[in-house]
Amino acid sequence: MADQQAQTGGEKRPSEIPAIRWEEPPEGPVLVLLDQTRVPAEEVELVCTDASALVEAIRSLAVRGAPLLGIAGAYGVALAAARGFDVVEAARALEGARPTAVNLSVGVRRAEAAYGAALTRTGDPTAAAAAALAAARALHQEDAEASARMAVHGLALLDELLPGGGHRILTHCNTGALVSGGEGTAFAVALAAHREGRLRRLWVDETRPLLQGARLTAYEAARSGMAYTLLTDNAAGSLFAAGEVDAVLIGADRIAADGSVANKVGSYPLAVLARYHHVPFIVVAPLTTLDPATPDGASIEVEQRPGFEVTEISAPQVPFAGPGGGVQVAPLGTQAYNPAFDVTPPELVTAVVTEEGAVSPVTAEALAELCARARRVPVDG
């Protein structure tokens, strides 16, 4: 389905299986994940009984996406507490599983703080474990609510920048329900435009080398009945040159205090193309992705992933051949440069959309004011 036309009828969730859920079978609590490395070929679930299993799932990208990593990290702390493991040790292991996505450490520390406060107050590990789980569930719910609000703010911004509808949106990596407690970040905005009849086309970057766009975003777009077309990352320039892109919408794994945006590698070239072609470049991310403790883009640690992700292609249904378990596409011994993310400077970002509204132009002062305003707004429930 490289070129899928819009479908009519009832809307569907991108997956019938939630990306993450907590369960309590008789043998003890578990965290159940949709294995995103197997999508779209099959929907297979992973069952994590301890934090170490979750760490491996995070590193292997079975669970991924900044908001969902925060939720997973919080649940991982709760799982360690409920199972009687060392909570501090589990928390540090989870935090280190992927260094760039700040949401992961935010979720871990929130559940860890709830656990520690309850343990200090009651001296009861069971009560402390319950507090950690409550914190994880609250974060999960808050992210779902943030997703819905980002969709509203993002669509309003699109309509302001591009009056008349008929939006042709280019997106990168995967930013839908597979990365969120709700319907996602950037993808949720495109989905809102689709539901309002204002999305003409969703251009989906494959997102090399692990094809999160081809495997996951196209999967979600097809499930949602959206009009979409898949393209290789290096075809984006010709698409801009042909005047076929009205806006770029991406997510973020970390936004520094100055507005620098770390996102899936390939995002920065899109920002450069967008600036040259006078196309809005919009980042959609929850407030948990903003990191005031990171002053600028140069201070963001960019995860370097194994070279075999570039020199091999993996597919669950294909016999394994290469050292990394995939089909070799480069000579044995080839060295590969494989950063998971790149950093886009704030001057190339048209706007940052959060659940509390949009910031444009993107400056340190505007982001700080947004965060301060959000802290003053009471959260219902």
Image: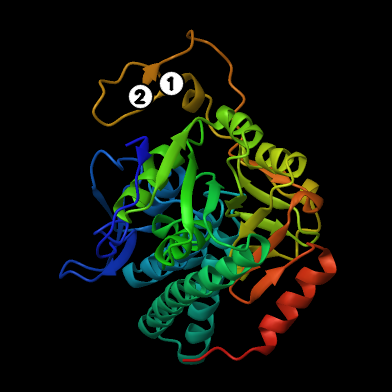
Question: Dot 2 surroundings within 10 Å: few (below 14), some, or many (20 or more)?
Answer: some
Name which residue type carries label 1: Glu
Q: Residue at x 69, y 89 (%)?
A: 376
Q: Residue at x 37, y 50 (%)?
A: 221
- Is 187 on the left or on the right of 100, as rendered? left
Q: Earlier in the sequence, mark 1 or mark 2?
A: 1
Please give the label number shown on residue 196: none
Mark 1 highlights which residue? 312
Name which residue type carries label 2: Gly
> Vertically, is 155 above or below 208?
below
Disc 1 secondary structure class: strand
Q: Disc 1 and disc 2: Cα gap in Å?
A: 8 Å
Mark 2 highlights which residue? 325
Provide residue 278's location: percent of width, then percent of height. Answer: 74, 46
Provide residue 119's location: percent of width, then percent of height. Answer: 48, 83
Q: Residue at x 51, y 62 (%)?
A: 189
Quarter where residue 326 is shown: top left
